[in-house]
Image (cartoon, rainbow, N blue to C red):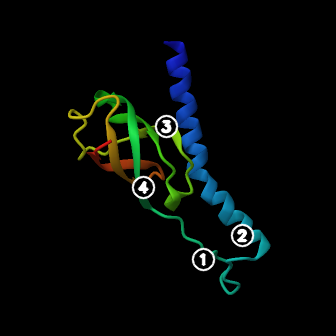
Amino acid sequence: MEIVKMRNRFSLIFAGLVALAPLAAVGADSQSGHGMNHDTGMTMASAKESAMGQGVIQAVHVEKQMVTMAHDPIPDLDWPAMTMDFPVSKQVDLTPFKVGDHVGFGVKKGMDGQFRIDQMNKVAQ
């Protein structure tokens, strides 16, 4: 059980680091002068706020409104293939989903900066 908790914590930490990676790139651009509006000092880069992906469900946590997903790369977010815990918006009913389901899903960045699954459907294998 401790291994599962440690893996879940690692997944959340990794997801946070991945979510912050675009901010590091914006900072690097602003320091080098690339992508910068020199009149205002503001960077012109904009991170994607939503994207689509595909993956296989590893765990469903209905009570926490969360899934553990092994997903394919998500190029729009510069995310490599990985397994991670995803919070799921309240509008998505998790009861039809089970471990091993192949799904297509949409993620959207919330006001808190965290990506959440806002749509999910089973897909043929």
Q: Position of residue 35 (x, y in %)?
A: 67, 77
Which residue occupies the extreme front position in the image? 125
Q: What amino acid type should be assigned to the residue bearing mark 1? A: Met
Q: Which residue is mark 4?
A: 111
Eye-nearest disc, 1 or 4 = 1
Rendered position, 10 above or below 21: above
Q: Which residue is mark 3?
A: 84
Q: Which residue is mark 2?
A: 29
Q: Report the Cα–Cα distance between label 1 and label 3.
A: 30 Å
Q: Earlier in the sequence, mark 2 or mark 3?
A: 2
Q: Report the Cα–Cα distance between label 4 and label 3.
A: 20 Å
Q: Residues within 10 Å of mark 1 (few under 14, many from 20)?
A: few
Q: Position of residue 16 (x, y in %)?
A: 56, 44
Q: What amino acid type should be assigned to the residue bearing mark 4? A: Met
Q: Report the Cα–Cα distance between label 2 and label 3.
A: 28 Å
Q: Earlier in the sequence, mark 4 or mark 3?
A: 3
Q: Earlier in the sequence, mark 1 or mark 2?
A: 2
Eye-nearest disc, 4 or 3 = 3
Q: Residues within 10 Å of mark 2 (few under 14, many from 20)?
A: some
Q: Is residue 108 left or right of residue 12?
A: left
Q: Report the Cα–Cα distance between label 1 and label 2.
A: 10 Å
Q: What amino acid type should be assigned to the residue bearing mark 3? A: Met
Number of the label disc, if any, that sits on residue 44: 1
Q: Earlier in the sequence, mark 1 or mark 3?
A: 1
Q: Position of residue 103 (x, y in %)?
A: 33, 44
Residue at x 66% of width, y 65% of height: 26
Q: Position of residue 42 (x, y in %)?
A: 64, 76
Eye-nearest disc, 1 or 3 = 3
